[in-house]
Image: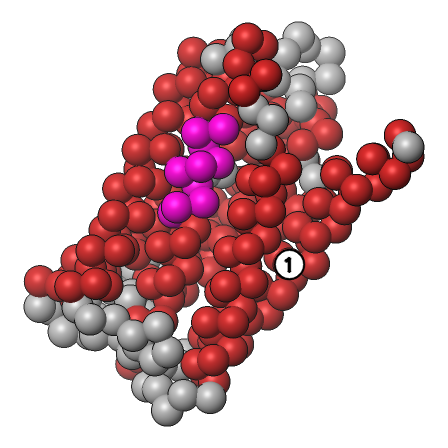
Amino acid sequence: MNSERNDKRTDGWLLVYSPLPVGEIFLCYLVIVWLGPKLMTYREPVNIKALLIIYNFSMVCLSAYMFYEFTASSWLANYSLVCQPVDYSETPLAMRMARVCWWFYVSKVIELTDTMFFILRKKNNQLTFLHVYHHGTMIFNWWAGVKYVAGGQSFLIGLINSFVHVVMYMYYGLAALGPQMHKYLWWKRYLTSLQLLQFFIVTIHTAVNFYADCNFPDSMNMVVLSYAFSLIALFSNFYYQSYISKKTKIA
């Protein structure tokens, strides 16, 4: 993709105009992942209960807002699930979709905070390859999405993921309230199943587009498809290790 194919509407937007800011954020993230646990080795876990509650329920609200905007923008613009090119015009609906794509991208940057919270609480078992890979790569994927294709086929990824994150951050928010809530959080296994389901839906949606005569970049579809396959593999392994393998060992 060259600069002539940039989405001119979003080209000057915050964290979009150049890959340098997001690259610098990513490098800082890796340094924190590497250095943070070392700095916490001889320190007590930090009590950030109030911050976690505020953060998680704020993310519920942001995710709900994005889900609504993706749904309303695509519905009002008569988006197709089979083939939906990007509307690069500056009509109100096209700009509305571009803006929610940008908010979704920014939300992925905000979500890097999840990792910092694990480090501060000394939950180093949560700093898995899956966690770091998923958080670190999503910011690049959506930088490219907003930079080149702010809308079109990519809308379904944001729509589904926003819904999943409403559920996910609701779970984490309730968990942060304290041990008295744990008896109501028996559905964590189904949250992982929901996360896996979204990747299968995105895979099917993207694969179908290859067979449609659609003016949406095949290069972007290839990136989405490859990434979805990697997440299916990683989340399936997590599901197996967390819910099937442990159950088998107990039995």
Magenta-drawn stretch, dominant element (helix, strand or loop): helix
Q: Amino acid at mark 1?
A: Ile
Residue 115 visible in image: yes
Image point 23% across, 63% down: which residue?
A: 74
In-image side of 9 versus 247 (left or right): left
For residue 247, above or below residue 150: above
Residue 3 visible in image: no
Instruction: Name the foreground residue: 124 vs 71.
Output: 71
- Per the image, is 223 magenta? no
Image point 37% across, 78% down: which residue?
A: 82
- Farthest residue, direction bottom: 213
At which x and y percent is residue 33?
A: 63, 35
Q: Secondary structure at mark 1?
A: helix
- Per the image, is 167 magenta? yes
- Farthest residue, direction front: 251
Instruction: Name the foreground residue: 152 vs 39.
Output: 152
Pointer 1 local density, CA inside 10 Å: few below 14, some 14–19, many at least 20: some
At which x and y percent is residue 50?
A: 43, 11
Q: In the rendered image, which quarter contains the C terminus? A: top right
- Farthest residue, direction left: 91
Image point 47% across, 80% down: which residue?
A: 208
Residue at the disc numbered 1: 232
For residue 235, above or below residue 80: above
Q: In the rendered image, which quarter contains the N terminus? A: bottom left
